[in-house]
Amino acid sequence: MILSCSSIHKTFGSDTILENVSFHIEEHEKAAIVGINGAGKSTLLKIIIGELPADGGEVVISKGKTIGYLAQHQDLESSRTIYQEVLEIKRPIIQMEERIRQLELSMKDAQGDQLEAMLSEYSRLNHQFELENGYAYKSEVIGVLKGLGFTEDEFHKKVTTLSGGQKTRVSLGRLLLSNPDIILLDEPTNHLDMESIAWLENYLLNYNGSVIIVAHDRYFLNRVVKKVIELDRGHAQVYVGNYDAYSQKRAMLRQAQMKAYLNQQQEIKHQQEVITKLKSFNREKSIKRAESREKMLAKIQVLDKPTEVNDAMSITLEPRIESGNDVLTIRNLGKSFGALSLFQHVDMDIKRGERVAVIGNNGTGKSTLLKIIMDMLPADTGEIRPGSKVHVGYYDQEQQVLHMEKTVFDEIQDEYPDMDNTRVRNVLAAFLFTGDDVFKRISDLSGGERGRVSLAKLMLSEANFLILDEPTNHLDITSKEILEDAINHYTGTVLYVSHDRYFINKTATRILELTGQTFINYLGNYDYYLEKKDELTRVYTGQEAVSGMGTKTAGPLAGLTASSSAFQVASDGTGAAAAGGAGAGSLDTTGKLDWKAQKEEQARLRKRQNDLKKTEDSIHKLETRSAEIDELLTQEEVYTNVARLMELNREKEGIDQQLEELYVIWEELAEEE
């Protein structure tokens, strides 16, 4: 155990944020802290790091262990460049290298004892330099900066000129390179694009220390963590497994808690009815029996009603009228800003009932596409034709559709003047605006609160075509799940931009990836996109998909994208031009994938993974027993009993032989490609 929190208690004024929170973290363990906004997640991290005092309880960190912390917001002030700022974390290694160079020069003129002392120090420093990866520290810094989305052109930017998000990435780079035993991360993915998040996932998965993460990115949590600590109404509940395992176990636990609560309520009601009936008899014995039951009832520890997912927000999206089958038609669309070309020759068709996710790196033009469709920006070339009876509802991540000077109440009532005050208040209450909250000005709201106002307007619009720009930004996990459910039950059409891979996986029926100035069309959700990304990016854009380290390799069809429109990846694994695409149909059958061979390869890989898992389980079981025998052999009652001693030695020899065979099998399986 490397860290333990015992009975942590924290209040702010009359509000109890944390109450009797206890959990522990093992060495090398990756854990998440989850809960709704305001549950106390960031507060708990600050208590662990010592930035905030707890009102009760204690935090214990193993002796000699180091801890690092990334807060949500960074106020990094430095006159250095990005590269210099991150390189500074390697100052001890840089100083060691400088001393080694000094010794090399000084030893040329030294003699006798002085030379011997210098040689001794030189040997010691070289050994330490090698142990601390001194020969590769510059490459390590560059790799982390590129992984976090900085290009080499940006390395020389001054930190003082950076945005808040860029400063957070610089701080994250410094933290990762400082290599503490325990890393605390508060929303580390907020300012990263998909490639950088994938890089960070791989970095943390291979990180040798322990990691505690507060994040709303469920796909990220799913990949990285093996323990989830949920904060709910001040209390902590620990779940073993990734986010999906936690979600399933939580649902089962909530169901069991609700059943226990309802059963207890039913029993209390029954006892109260019996007590009332006994008292109504107005007999001494009956009254005594009633009083006895009352005493028993008073001793019952009444269960709290479990919180339900749907207690947070209530979203129902339903179109007023049905659109035609052709919802949106785009032909030859192009957009540039000066010398920067975002996309060219884009043809696209969106049909009724589709839920289309647009993904891609930051700055590629995803939000620009939506703004062109909404006529908020002009296109350079091409045309956009909405279909018959299409009524659009728009959600803007920058909340430009809201009026900053209005109150929350007026924002809704002015948009829908036929609604009376009671209905406006009821709608706002469904989005957690109650009491005087409805009279707050939009300009005074947080990003999450503004997002909820926009969602309320979207729900009331009764649109049959929703265009959403980062709809899950600022929403907590519970609210995201409610929005997912609303979109999945929506009978209209949805086009949205999102970085939230879990949200995409749950809601998208089709994915458009903006890469190489064109759109590649995947007929499936995010898992399907991941399965096909490498091979289809290579085939259709002439590039390898960007790896976790951010490198690209030219493919066999390099240059194809410059004159091509949106390519479509069909669910059968073959490539075809998107509907209406110009110049995209010239690929011959050599571009098609051998689906049968691919399925056989997938089956082989699954079998290999299963065999590996079984072998690893067997090894673990035998190693555990071997350790138990070693412990037994140190006990006097065992090593003085010749028969028992021989029996255990024979068992250990057998285990050792089995382990040797299993190690060989494991190595063979691990080396298979």
Image (cartoon, rainbow, N blue to C red):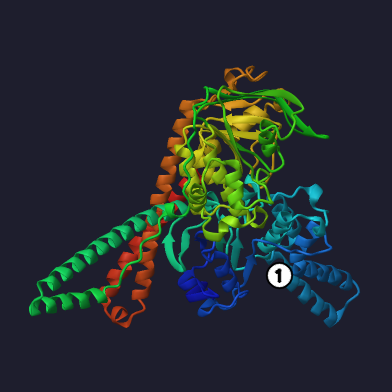
Residue 179: x and y, percent?
65, 65
Rendered view: 368 above or below 456: above
Choose top left, top right, bottom left or bottom right for residue 268. Answer: bottom left
- Residue occupying image coordinates x 60% and y 77%: 64
- Residue occupying image coordinates x 82% and y 56%: 161
Count of labels shown?
A: 1
Residue 214: x and y, percent?
56, 60
Q: Is residue 338 left or right of residue 140?
A: right
Asked whether 221 or 328 is in front, the reply is 328
Rendered view: 14 above or below 610: below
Q: Is residue 658 left or right of residue 74?
A: left
Q: Is residue 251 left or right of residue 386?
A: left
Res. 647 visible in picture:
yes
Asked whether 281 or 261 is in front, the reply is 281
Residue 371: x and y, percent?
69, 36
Choose top left, top right, bottom left or bottom right for residue 182. Answer: bottom right
Res. 202 visible in picture:
no
Mark 1 burial class by Cα count in 10 Å: few <14, some 14-19, many 20+: some
**Label 1: which secondary element:** helix
Residue 489: x and y, percent?
44, 38
Mark 1 highlights which residue? 128
Q: Amino acid at mark 1?
A: Gln
Asked whether 657 or 164 is in front, the reply is 164
